[in-house]
Image (cartoon, rainbow, N blue to C red):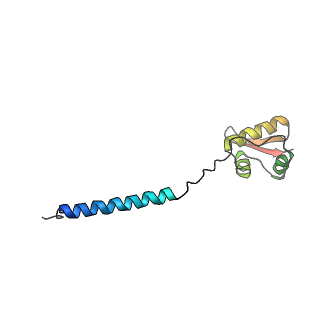
Amino acid sequence: MGGKKKLGLKQMERMQTKKDEEDSKKKEKTAAASPREKKSSGIVPPDVKNEKIVGELKKMPVLTPYAVASRFNIRISAARDFLEQLKENGIIEQVGGNHNIKIYKAN
């Protein structure tokens, strides 16, 4: 039957002090390490009137929200809005897709 023998008071005290020291060392390491800055992908879409951006889009054979988002490092929702603005300005035209995804090409 048996089982693990109970520790004495002195042994329990030693284990507790050792654990406290390890915890304090871990806290010092995390405090010493500089916190990383979160790089959030941009929420604001690029400027529609910027010729450089429009020129890059015209080089792409097919424009989807994912392709634009990954190219300009913005969110997909912002890329979707950006493509809608370009469509309204007549820079691109919709060639396919459905209610979930739209596919565009440059004029």
Q: Nearer the viewer, residue 22 or 59?
A: 22
Instruction: Classify residue 24 by image quadrant.
Output: bottom left
Instruction: Classify residue 34 by image quadrant.
Output: bottom right
Left or right of 22? Residue 82 is: right
Quick check: 44 above or below 31?
Answer: above
Residue drawn at 22 percent across, 64 percent down:
11
Farthest residue toward the top? 88
Residue drawn at 45 percent across, 59 percent down:
28
Q: Nearer the viewer, residue 53 or 92?
A: 53
Quick check: 55 above or below 1?
Answer: above
**Total residue callouts:** 0
The location of residue 77, given as percent across then percent down, is: 67, 40
Q: Nearer the viewer, residue 38 or 17?
A: 17
Left or right of 29? Residue 91 is: right
Quick check: 26 above or below 102?
Answer: below
The location of residue 45, given as percent across then percent down, is: 73, 41
Left or right of 60? Residue 39 is: left
The location of residue 20, given as percent across then percent down, is: 34, 59
Q: Quadrant of the C terminus?
A: top right
Q: Quadrant of the N terminus?
A: bottom left
Q: Nearer the viewer, residue 57 or 38?
A: 38
Residue drawn at 27 percent across, 63 percent down:
15
Residue drawn at 68 percent across, 45 percent down:
42
Farthest residue toward the left? 1
